Amino acid sequence: MWGSIVISDPTILVINCGSSSVKFALFANEPNAPRRLVSGALERLGLPDARFRAKDEDRNILIDEIHDIPNHVAALDLLLSKLETLLSHDQVLAVGHRVVHGGNDCDCSLPVTAALESRLRKLIPLAPLHLPHNLAGIMAVRVRRPDVLQVACFDTAFHLALPRLARLTGLPQDFEEQGIRRYGFHGFSYEYVIEELRSRTGDATANSRLIVAHLGNGASMAAFRDGQSVETTTGLTTLAGLPMGTRSGDLDPGILLYLLKEKGITTEQMQRLLYRQCGLLGLSGLSRNMQKLLARPGSKAAAEAIEFFCYRARKHLAALTAPLGGLDRLVFTGGIGANSPEIRAKICDGLSYLGIELGNARNASGRPIISAKSSSVVVEAFPTDEEIMIARHVRHVLAEQPAAREA
């Protein structure tokens, strides 16, 4: 099943339950830094061609199988069953979970406790596509390994220090006191990009005026100065900002009032509409997947959905330069951002007034630097790695043992 791979090291397991997939990675807990041993994903959950893929640290394919995986619970059961054939009972030191929303109080990764789980369940309305699956991952591990330390790593924690004006919503202050504020998401992706820039090109680059575009089925952008988040496109929930695979992005709240009052849509129907039926899927009527839409050049609906996505992304990108007072560097990441030269070109088209100029050959080549030599803004594109950031956070919690188990 796992080929010739043998793991003898103590490991950290990372589980990243998304809206339509379960990603995972195993890291050796080595003295200097976690080292990736195995990574993979269970994707297209609920569809006939759901897949379980895994590769080793040299990117050799270990598993590539089609399975009937109707939901996240089945995916987690399959994943943990297969991992039990690879690892002995005492090899997993801890399991780190990406938890999309931590609310107003979670500014760092925390050991999972009954009290924390209870608090997270109350936040489900703020991230209904993600938090139920995040909690399912925690429960699945607890059923099989009640003794193992589990660590909740919060996507929102990275943005909790946003400047006050960037946190405000425009609602009366009483609402802010109830935790209704702008939070921001994709924190692990942004944290990885900042650290990658710092390790590759030094503090000066990481501390420059930077915008990162995390573009995938979930999408957002954020602006950074001195390595700190100063503005982001998402808000209280994962609905705001850019259009996404099935989410609308920014929407006039008057539309929602009109649909509720005049069209008789229930709150349950509204939630399903906004989270599951809008964005690329709703506009195209074909797919939430950008790659599939790009493969339909003859479809007017697909073309319009793509153009809308790029138009809105271009607007948000330009707007994020305002709190920065300009722009020095732009990084594209995420499944679309790192892998689609066509989308990057469409988004950057017309932004030469900001100093953004792509080099056509560079953009198509897949190299990290994709800006033209004449561009005053350095533009890069490279994959993110949320799992390694979660593993690093888990190591930090482990280092605080035994305090971690007593939290």
Image (spheres, rainbow, N blue to C red):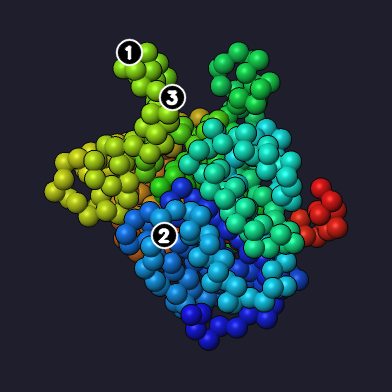
Residue 133 shows in the view: yes
Label 1, on which residue?
A: 262
Instruction: Name the spot of residue 134 as percent of width and height, x first.
Output: 57, 48
Residue 258 occupies quadrant:
top left
Q: Position of residue 155 (x, y in %)?
A: 60, 45
Q: Which mark is residue 69?
A: 2
Answer with mark 3 or mark 2, whichever residue precedes in sequence.
2
Q: CA–CA distance between discs 1 and 2?
A: 39 Å
At 67% from the left and 50% from the top, the residue drawn is: 152
Q: Tell which circle, 1 or 2, labels the residue nearer the N-terminal end.
A: 2
SS at badge 3: helix
Instruction: Say whether residue 290 is left or right of residue 272.
Output: left
Q: Is residue 226 visible?
A: no
Identify the amino acid type marked 1. Glu
The front one of 216 and 19 is 19
| Residue drawn where x is 64% and y is 39% of the image | 120
Dot label at residue 267: 3
Q: Amino acid at mark 2?
A: Ile
Give the SS element for disc 1: loop
